[in-house]
Image: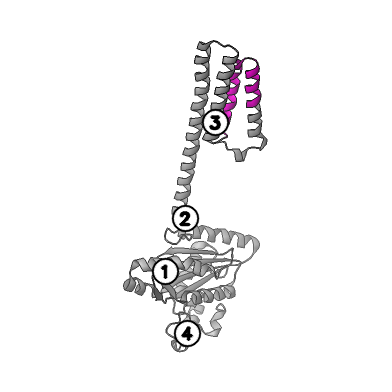
Amino acid sequence: MFSVERLPSWCPRGLDAALVVLAVSGAITDPLAFSHGIAIVLVLQAFLLERRAAAVRVGLTALLTIAASAAHGAAVPDVAIQVPFVYGLATLVVLLADSLRRSRSTTEAALRDAERLALYDTLTGLPNRVLFHDRVEHALDLARRDRTSVALLLMDLDRFKEVNDTFGHHVGDLLLREMGPHLGEELRDGDTLARLGGDEFAVLLPGAGAAVAVSVAERLVRAVERPFVIDGQALSVGASVGIACSPEHASDAGTLLRRADVAMYQRRPVRCPPHSREESRRARTRVASSTRSASSCSSASALCVPRRTKTSPP
């Protein structure tokens, strides 16, 4: 469908000028002889202008033609037949153009809604798993081209089930909605925060390595630990975060997500996956040795990481 915005600014004005010239010429000489040319201009305007503007032009030119015809002494039967036919046809075109315009707007709105339902989480408005996977693939392609790194974080909320069981799913949903703005404050403009489902969130950090990823993960956990006031209730939750980096841990989106998922369910809340079985063995040893120091932290804390865990495993 044509629209005024897609055409040069002179085009609608040019059609208005042509309409005026034809109408005035007809009024001076023979109105009925110029009515067909006027109708053609009106039909073109019907597809460029909104219904009201086009209808006003049809009405004014029809009245001008009738008045000029009477002034020139045109035969009444000719005026009675030609004017309704010509300008009635123009009116029908105006209505048809408006109907098509409205139909297109409705279709575009439906397509936008369908795209949003397919790519965004309906509860939080964040990208869903499908869109997040696509963005990870795109970030990996750019990283391979530019020889940079990509970090992926998976985060699971701690004590979220207790919130649902104690206060109800309505409060749990409100808490999840608050997570998006809360966590987004800790991220850069180019980062992606997504909700994968339930109480699981994911973060894509293009151009970031393990050290940056751990720093971001710690900020996210601290943000989650800050109390949320929902329906007058102060809610306290925590988070466990798993980190995987490309190219160190994986070079494709599926594997990178799995490595981050495995890291998230290990015992330390912020964790990068090891590179090999030997590293896995050493990592389990380090986790076991850090359990005592971790247990001495406040029970309200969702992150208690020994200083050496701020760097990726050797």
Residue behind mark 2:
119
**What distance separates the C-alpha of mark 2 from that of mark 3?**
43 Å
Region rendered in magenta: 19-48
Residue at x 57% of width, y 70% of height: 248
Amino acid bearing label 3: Val
Amino acid bearing label 4: Thr
Amino acid bearing label 1: Leu
Residue at x 61% of width, y 60% of height: 142
Q: Earlier in the sequence, mark 4 or mark 3?
A: 3
Q: Earlier in the sequence, mark 1 or mark 3?
A: 3
Secondary structure beneath dot 1 equals helix
Residue behind mark 1:
175
**What distance separates the C-alpha of mark 1 from that of mark 3?**
53 Å
**What distance separates the C-alpha of mark 1 from that of mark 4?**
36 Å
Residue behind mark 4:
285
Q: Earlier in the sequence, mark 2 or mark 1?
A: 2
Q: Earlier in the sequence, mark 2 or mark 3?
A: 3
Where in the figure is residue 257, as x and y percent of width and height?
Answer: 48, 66
Where in the figure is residue 41, as x and y percent of width and height?
Answer: 60, 26
Q: Is residue 46 covered in magenta? A: yes
- Say left or right for 42 vs 179: right
Q: Earlier in the sequence, mark 1 or mark 4?
A: 1
State the image quarter where residue 245 is shown: bottom right
The residue closer to the viewer here, 68 or 31, is: 68
Amino acid bearing label 2: Leu
The residue closer to the viewer here, 288 or 72, is: 72
Residue behind mark 3:
56
**Is label 4 or label 3 in front?**
3
**Is label 4 or label 2 in front?**
2
Where in the figure is residue 68, as x and y percent of width and height?
Answer: 59, 18
